Image (cartoon, rainbow, N blue to C red):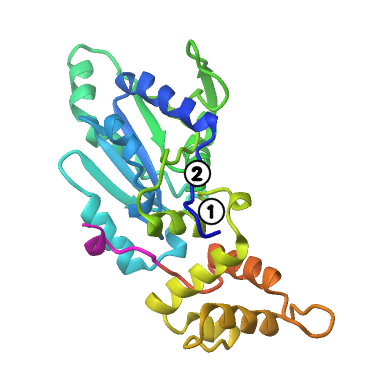
Amino acid sequence: MSGDINWFPGHMAKSLRMIDEHVAAVDAVFYVLDARAPASCLNPQFDRALEKKPVVYLLNKADLAEPAVTAAWERALTGERARAVSLNAGVSKSAAALLPLIRTLCAAKLEKYRSKGANATLKAMVLGVPNTGKSTVVNNLCGKYKTVTGDRPGVTRGKQWVRVAPYLELLDTPGTLYPKFIDRTTAWRLCFIGSVKDEIVDTGELARRLIEELTAGHAGRLQKRYEADEAQASAVVLEQIAKARGFLLKGGESDADRAAAALIDDFRKGRLGRISLERPEAAV
């Protein structure tokens, strides 16, 4: 697929409208990013939702990224109204530290209610592009408080308020991409991590692009796993991967399609090692 990559179905446009409608009612935002490509996961369409709101950036899937790079992202994303934490939401209770953090960021509101002898219920919106693990984060936070507190007017599937603690309700939102990608590198990286629907991208081209990205920034990974000669063109490397995995067609020809799918799956599941595609200093 050599043309522009765009995937923005109608439900994503509807999701953006819902976010705009509800953002005024929330006290803070949980912004879930894939730790391997945080910059690409920062959707400019969410900028309005972040204005004047405390933000907790969740660098999820940190177990798949390079620890030092993720730590650098935590520092880069932390500011006066923002905090950044890394986690693997697939591990039970790994998101527990987010609860005291949101209380700290919303301390002014809590103190205001406390001074009146009342308890405040904080409301937070969960944002993110597809496949960053938003639902996993919400489920991790829920624990024994996993109770839906009721649909709001006009709220449909994927827009329910969920109580995750006695003082905190979350509004989970559907994963939403940009209406149009301007930067093609960003588009490809979102494809690598699975944020763009695989069916709209040619698997062979995606694998070749991934090979180019890995040989340029993570030399030795393909050689180690597949004994591939990374000095060769990406199409040749893909053939070497096919042979290494035993993906052969009748007559001994390499099955490049199976090799492409296997390479992408190996990357997404961390079988190539911990890889960070983006560093904060390059994203500034």
What residue lies at 29% left-to-right and 49% top-to-bottom?
84
Q: CA distance from mark 2 to mark 1?
A: 8 Å
Residue 248's x, y, as percent?
77, 80
For residue 49, above or below residue 151: below
Q: In the shown orientation, is residue 88 left or right of residue 106? A: right
> Which quadrant holds the N terminus?
bottom right
Q: Residue under circle 2?
A: 130
The reply to whether callout 2 and callout 1 are in contact (CB within 8 Å) is yes
Residue 103's x, y, as percent?
28, 33
Looking at the image, the residue that sits furthest to the right is 250
Q: Secondary structure at mark 2?
A: loop
Q: Residue under circle 1?
A: 194
Q: In the shown orientation, is residue 29 left or right of residue 165? A: left
Residue 215's x, y, as percent?
44, 79
> Which quadrant holds the C terminus?
bottom left
Q: Secondary structure at mark 1?
A: loop
The foreground one among 146 and 55 is 55
The foreground one among 133 and 243 is 243
Q: Which residues are magenta?
A: 276-284
